[in-house]
Amino acid sequence: MLLVTPQERNRRLDLCKACKYYKANTQSCGTLLRPRTLRNGVKLCGCFLPAKTKFKFSECPAGFWSATVTSEDQDRIREAVKWTGSLSLSQTRELVDIYNRVTGTTNTYTGCNACLTNMRDELKRFLEYPIDQAVKEDTARVAQKYLPDK
């Protein structure tokens, strides 16, 4: 649920590799672990791109590719995971719609409380996953190969 399709990941990586700021030896956006904004306004994240490009929440800071789960989607999820008990018809529709949008599924509207609770719980886990930290950890692990020993 957190990951884009392999095709989307490859598309993103291809865009990164075509960028003049891509560092092929480290597979990074600019220098590993050194996010910065250039004088021309271009933002470089310093991330290990095979890690960053796989997550739905990730986006290119220079704008070459976007997150497939937008900040608006995240706001909708935050609201939906607060709902408890029996949901109204409009809440049910909103929950199923955002669940389908984020997961790429085509679930139909349901009155099954257990099904709706499972969707809500899965969306909550989705929000709570530390994607930025996971990308930073992968980047730091890769950077160990390139940083001088101390």
Image: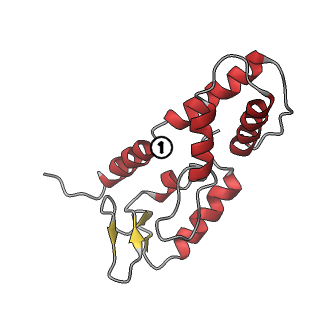
Name the residue rendered at 45%, 39% in the picture: 130
Height in image: 7 above or below 18? above
Nearer to the camera, 41 or 143: 41
Task: Please tell me how many numbered marks the rendered image carries.
Answer: 1
Name the colouring of the figure.
Answer: secondary structure
According to the picture, the residue beneath numbered tag 1 turns out to be 131
Q: Amino acid at mark 1?
A: Ile
Nearer to the camera, 28 or 94: 94
Q: Does residue 54 appear in the picture of this structure?
A: no
Residue 87 located left or right of residue 41: right
Height in image: 129 above or below 132? above
Local crowd size for mark 1, using a 10 Å CA cut-off: few (<14), some (14–19), many (≥20):
some
The extreme bottom residue here reads: 40
The spot of residue 69 in percent (x, y) is 62, 50
Name the residue rendered at 33%, 49% in the picture: 140
Height in image: 54 above or below 115? below
Classify mark 1: helix, strand or loop.
Answer: helix
The extreme left residue here reads: 150
Nearer to the camera, 82 or 106: 82
The spot of residue 36 in percent (x, y) is 32, 68
Q: Does residue 77 appear in the picture of this structure?
A: yes
The spot of residue 67 in percent (x, y) is 59, 56
Name the residue rendered at 46%, 79% in the picture: 20
The spot of residue 82 in percent (x, y) is 58, 28
Location of residue 134 by image quarter: top left
Q: Quadrant of the N terminus?
A: top right
Name the residue rendered at 55%, 56% in the picture: 53
